[in-house]
Image: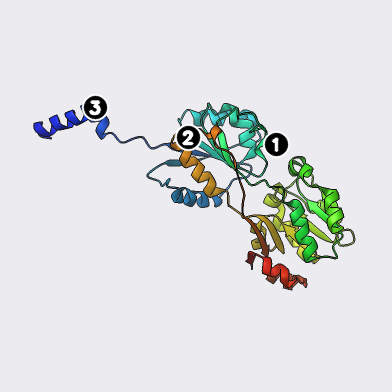
Amino acid sequence: MKRREFLRAVAACGLAGASPRALSAAPPIPRVIFLDDSEMPQGERLQIFRQSLELAGLSAERIRFEVAGMPGSDVRALRRELGACVKRDPGAFVTVSADIAVNGIAYMARIPLVMGTQIDPVKLGIQGPAAPRRHNVTGFSYDVPIDVKAFEVLADTFPDARRVALVADRIWMEHHRGSLDVSEVNARFGIDIDLVIPASPRSVEWEFERLLPSRTDACYVPNSDVTAFSAPALIAFLQRHRMPHLFASDGALRLGALMSYGVRRDSHWLPMATMLRHVLSGAEASDMPFERAREFLLGINAAQAARMGLVIPKHIVRRANLVI
């Protein structure tokens, strides 16, 4: 650099209150660590989040995105692993594990957390019903009380179904059963609900006897660990017995499920990416409200219905957002 150019640079920096070195130094790229629950890793679904980050303006040139496996339910091990992540000075944490959020948020050293959760953040203790949040956390909750609507879809599609089994894990029952008005379902649709809670969401076969056609007319499967671990086995059983069924996740359709009604699968990634962009821009996560799902999808597997010999009424097919 010539002397005259150097003096001009010094003068410009003096006007801006910065040194020549500061003027030429690029701002550090913030590190974002995705805390992936090793008990239920996201796998290929993380690619959807990476695409959502791009759409939200957080390309690889803007952030340093890393994935760290975390033992979600082992609090002592989680605390140790989180401590190692905190030392790396991330700009934010991201997770879709309720276990990591509940068991680890106290150890995140005020680093903001953007999370996605199937459970209401108030029920998780992440957010109070009225008081400000104690931790710097926000996110997307796709917990919405639409289970009565799901039974309405079943009743409209299969009006002869009088006894419907609801298959979910104990955590779902603890957090969602209170929002499901069983008496309303019975009064409106003439349906008796049989709650089926497998001892382990990884193995539902021992409950199949309770789901035999001699006892059950149809089956409703909300989003829980049962669908995460045992959807293929459950769907195969329902197919084999030609039993009408409805899952809350449209992802189950691609596994062979008959119908689905609920929040669109993977709809949480883009809102989370957008929130992350605001957090990295300086917004306090604790000041940002949790977002809720606004889009619901009715899906029908017409090919599976034909194989099972079940007829889906035309007015239900016309209402569907997705037919495969």
Amino acid type at image mark 2: Ala
Location of the C terminus (image quadrant): bottom right
Reading the image, the residue beneath label 2 is: 283
> Residue 219 location, x and y as percent?
79, 58
Q: Residue 213 in the image: x percent, y percent?
A: 86, 62
Q: Residue at x 86, y 49 (%)?
A: 183
In the image, taking residue 21 as reference, residue 50 lies left or right, namely: right
Which amino acid lies under the numbered mark 3 shown in the image of this protein?
Answer: Ser
Image vertical order of residue 23 relative to residue 206, above or below: above
Q: Residue at x 45, y 37 (%)?
A: 280
Q: Where does the image place residue 180, in percent across and percent down from the top left?
A: 78, 47
Decide: is 115 above or below 45. above
Can residue 48 be seen at all in this image of the molecule?
Answer: yes
Q: Nearer the viewer, mark 1 or mark 2?
A: 2
Q: Nearer the viewer, mark 3 or mark 2?
A: 2
User: Residue under circle 3?
Assistant: 19
